[in-house]
Image: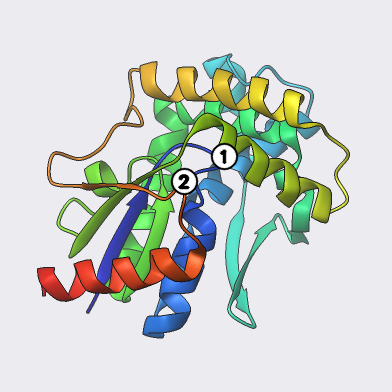
Amino acid sequence: MIRIAIDGPSGSGKSTLAKAVARELGIIYVDTGALYRTVGYFVYANGKDPHNAYEVEALLPNVQIELKYENGSQRVILNGEDLGDKIRMPEMSMYASAVSSIPAVRQFLLEMQKKMARENSVVMDGRDIGTVIIPDADLKIFLVASNETRAKRRTLELLEKGVETTYEDVLVDMTERDKQDKNRDIAPAVPADDAIIFDNSEMSVEESLVEIKRLLNERK
């Protein structure tokens, strides 16, 4: 059983690296951020305030989330609907950050994530994997990159998916989300004490993957 936690801020390249590691090792990749984006999307679709804990909690009994894996990719199914890239819209980042600070939402998704890690070899990425979801992971990485690099990556990713946006708008949203994630009372987005701080600002995915494999071998 291998369990790897990759945490870090938005746009640091967590998902891209985690997918590459999972493919290389032949294990399951779990994008935990997609779960919070899905709850955020449901709040958005129902016209509720993501900062209003009472309104959000009232919606949770109507949320059924299922994860499917097709051709190595994770698909999120909300109440029978494959959301595809709907949860990747720029505004969903803010919704995800807001609902993730609500204790009822975190508890709602917590057991789902822990169960996956108990039963499978996994690479999980998010913001509190190494501190909350898999505190005993074999390897904990806190991935960072410069604000400019992160904003460029996220802008390119969104444009490739057909989402109209600008570098400036992405940078503003990213900076605001960083502030929310770091300062929230519940599971703030900070490195675990035993996490390795990994700056990949000047690294390709292939170079990062080589380094992750080296670190994993050292830990094993």
Residue 15 lies, with reference to residue 86, above or below; the image says below
What whole-number distance in Å separates the C-alpha atoms at marks 1 and 2?
Answer: 6 Å
Say left or right for 56 vs 131: right
Residue 113 lies, with reference to residue 174, above or below; the image says below
Q: Quadrant of residue 188?
A: top left
**x, y percentage for residue 110?**
37, 47
Earlier in the chain: of badge 1 and badge 2, it is 1
Amino acid bearing label 1: Thr
**x, y percentage for residue 154?**
66, 43
Depth order, front residue of 198/131: 198
Which SS class for mark 2?
A: loop
Proximity of marks 1 and 2: CB atoms separated by less than 8 Å = yes
Depth order, front residue of 218/85: 218
Task: Residue 83: tell me if it is visible.
Answer: no
Total marks placed: 2
Residue 152 lies, with reference to residue 71, above or below; the image says above
- What residue does disc 1 label? 149
In which quadrant will I find the C terminus? bottom left
Q: Which of the numbered marks, if any, corresponds to residue 201?
A: 2
Amino acid bearing label 2: Ser
Task: Residue 50: tell me if it is visible.
Answer: yes
**x, y percentage for residue 181?**
44, 25
Judge the density around disc 1: few (<14), some (14-19), many (≥20) Cα neighbours within 10 Å: some
The image's colour scheme reads: rainbow
**x, y percentage for residue 70?**
65, 79
Q: Quadrant of residue 28?
A: bottom left
In which quadrant will I find the N terminus? bottom left
Which SS class for mark 1?
A: helix
Q: Residue at x 69, y 30 (%)?
A: 43
Judge the density around disc 2: few (<14), some (14-19), many (≥20) Cα neighbours within 10 Å: some
